[in-house]
Image (spheres, rainbow, N blue to C red):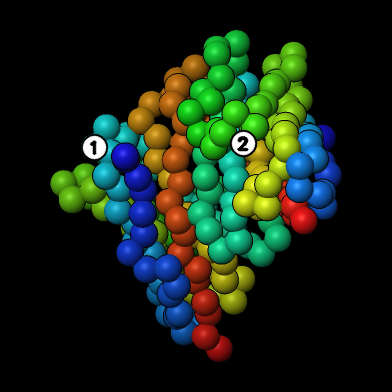
């Protein structure tokens, strides 16, 4: 079936460096993509989203890139901080009436 | 309340017993989702309510699982005859459908279910 998945289950990054978390999706009909951050013991929190008519969107210290040709999504975090330690999930949906499907997640570990 | 509220936060039950998990979404949010998260795993979709439409139950793993949403607000997820493999964190999320697009999900902190 259709799925959203991630290339790396765990990513270790030096504090201050940039982090790049990748996600591959297989449903070509998906037109809305979202990144969520989940800290230990909490529910996921929205970070940033992007629609299929865009290839890049920037937020505060975060950038999401979408490449529909290869069905690839990435989250870039600039100047990674200890507070960025969490599990990051990408998610997709096909339209506003469809369910939102999450990938398996990548754990981001910040090295001091 | 200000956010999505789930209760109880922790539930320990014996195999074979029924459990009910409650979700209070953000007021005015028309969409409500239930997800299951096993230890160290991703979010597994269970069920989705959107306004007055029939719920999307395609993610429910067996007929032991059911959910309802009363009055378009509070939702209850019921697991009958619980099994040890049901042990997980059950997350509820809600969002506002603006009529143009589905807005971002707001998650509760989840219910940690442990089946002994």
Judging by the rendered image, the residue that carries numbered circle 2 is B34
Q: Nearer the viewer, residue B112 or A28?
A: B112
> Where is B108 relative to A63, above or below?
above
Which mark, residue A28?
Answer: 1
Q: Secondary structure at mark 2?
A: strand
Residue A47 x, y percent position in the rendering: 52, 51
Observer-side mark, 2 or 1, equals 2
Image quarter (top left, top right, bottom left or bottom right) of the C terminus of chain B: bottom right
Residue A27 x, y percent position in the rendering: 28, 39
Q: Quadrant of residue B81?
A: top right
**How many residues crowd around disc 1 within 10 Å: few (fewer than 14), some, or many (20 or more)?**
few
Residue B75 x, y percent position in the rendering: 73, 27
Image quarter (top left, top right, bottom left or bottom right) of the N terminus of chain B: top right
Whole-Å distance between the Cαs marked 2 and 1? Answer: 24 Å
**How many residues crowd around disc 2 within 10 Å: few (fewer than 14), some, or many (20 or more)?**
many
Q: Chain of mark 2?
A: B
Which residue is painted at 32% across and 34% down in the image? A31
> Where is B35 relative to A45, above or below?
above
Give the total number of marks visible in the rendering: 2
């Amino acid at each position: 079936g259709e799925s959203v998945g991630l290339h790396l289950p765990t990513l270790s990054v030096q504090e201050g460096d940039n982090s790049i978390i990748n996600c591959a999706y297989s449903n070509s009909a998906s037109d809305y993509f979202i990144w969520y951050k989940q800290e230990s013991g909490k529910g996921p929190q929205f970070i940033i989203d992007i629609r299929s008519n865009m290839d890049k969107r920037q937020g505060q210290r975060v950038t999401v890139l979408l490449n529909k040709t290869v069905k690839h999504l990435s989250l870039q975090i600039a100047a990674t901080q200890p507070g960025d330690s969490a599990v990051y999930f990408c998610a997709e949906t096909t339209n506003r009436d469809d369910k939102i499907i999450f990938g398996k997640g990548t754990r981001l570990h910040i090295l001091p | 309340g200000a956010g999505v509220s789930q209760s109880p936060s922790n539930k320990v039950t014996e195999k074979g017993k029924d459990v009910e998990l409650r979700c209070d979404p953000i007021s005015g949010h028309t969409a409500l989702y239930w997800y299951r998260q096993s230890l160290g795993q991703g979010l597994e979709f269970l069920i989705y309510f959107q306004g007055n439409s029939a719920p999307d139950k395609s993610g429910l793993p067996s007929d032991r699982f059911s959910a309802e949403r009363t009055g378009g607000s509070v939702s209850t997820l019921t697991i009958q005859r619980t099994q040890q493999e049901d042990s997980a964190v059950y997350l509820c999320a809600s969002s506002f459908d603006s009529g143009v697009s589905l807005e971002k999900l707001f998650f509760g902190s989840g219910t940690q279910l442990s089946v002994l």
